[in-house]
Amino acid sequence: MAEQKNTLFDRPGGYAMPSGAAGVHREAAASKVEMVLPGDSESAFEASSNLQQPLYEATDPDTRVYLGDCREVLANLPDRGKVDLVFADPPFNWDVPYDEWKDNMSRAQYERFTYDWLDACIDVLSPTGSLWVNIPDDTAAEVVMHLKRRGMTMINWCVWHFRFGQCRHSSFIMSKVHVLYFAKNPDERTWNPDEILEQSDRASVYKDARTMAKDTNKGMRVPMDVWYGSYLGRIQGNNKERRHGHHNQIPEAYLERVIRSTSNPGDLVLDPFLGSGTTSTVAKALERRSIGIEFSETNAKSAWERINSIGMIRKGTIGGSSAIQSKRGNRGKSKASS
């Protein structure tokens, strides 16, 4: 059914957000729908009760890197219940050589692993905390359903779109990863829309006077739920952000959007799969405290070097236009997204 324009509000020339999707997500979170998923057939992970010390630690802001299985570390973290934001980019189980990590589990084992680390992340979140998961097509549905049965509320199902997917002829080229945004309490979560505004197409392409008639943020909008644009493409080999030896590295602009929008300066940000260290690097640049957990000592060392010696390279890229069309009235080809 086509979306209908809502005129029951006083705002010059805009649309109100339909309440249907938000209502469905709230209802699902409240009901904690009972369901059985394939990975449930495997035994759940049982963590020990051994409190671990950080492998690396720094102050101003508090920044820590723990070495080990995130399920074990999270179960014994002294900050349980105090983490404001979790961002997770887990192994995809695509048989990628992540140094010491086994990335070729059976499907059932991988799904059980996924439920276990998700549960551990939920348990460390504060009552107002948010959880973001970066996950491909083949596991997105399972992550969503498990988080719903755990009582988490979906705020957005975003898509990170990139132009350099791996070439193939057997099917359409994969050019996206899912960006799942959940909260423990949708009414009490941290949400800073003004921190992540970008130029709207109405202003940058169509020169629509209505967007300049707003009382605040003239010509600007909150980004849409498909993410693309400058500095939001995949990190290729010649990219300045590229860290040698790391796979599937996420761009700093992606993490800046997540961290600015769903945490405040001084908040505690956690990444259970630290990898190249992007989350903690951006968190430190934005004056957030952070915890990173990494299975590989080699990767942890590389990430720590980036966090403390190199720092964030792309800070301040938010605010431009992500339009894929040229300005109306101008000739020329459309601008391709990165």
Image: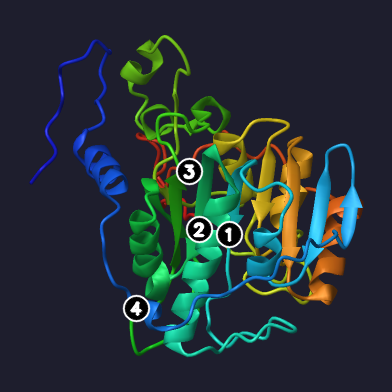
Q: Is residue 265 left or right of residue 329?
A: right
Question: Secondary structure beneath disc 4?
Answer: loop
Position in image of residue 117 (x %, y %): 55, 66
Q: According to the image, label 2 marks what residue?
A: 133
Disc 3 versus disc 1: nearer the observer: 1
Q: Which mark is residue 172?
A: 4
Which disc, if any, is residue 88? 1
* Sequence order check, earlier mark of 4 and 1: 1
The answer to the question of whether label 4 and label 1 lie on touching residues, with beta carbons closer than 8 A, is: no
Q: Residue at x 55, y 37 (%)?
A: 262
Q: Which mark is residue 322?
A: 3
77, 260: nearer the viewer: 77
Q: Label 2 neighbourhood size at 10 Å, few (<14), some (14-19), many (20+)? A: many
What is the spatial separation of the Cα atoms under label 3 and label 1, in whole angstroms?
Answer: 25 Å
Contact? badges 2 and 1 (CB < 8 Å): yes
Q: Nearer the viewer, residue 248 or 36?
A: 36
Q: Spatial distance from mark 2 to mark 4, Cα to Cα?
A: 24 Å
The answer to whether marks 3 and 1 mark residues whose Cβ atoms lie closer than 8 Å is no
Amino acid on which disc 3 is placed: Ser
Judged from the image, the secondary structure of the residue bearing numbered disc 1 is strand
Q: Position of residue 13 (x, y in %)?
A: 25, 18
Identify which amino acid the numbered label 4 is placed on: Phe
Residue at the outermost front position: 49
Q: How far apart are the alpha carbons under marks 2 and 3? A: 23 Å
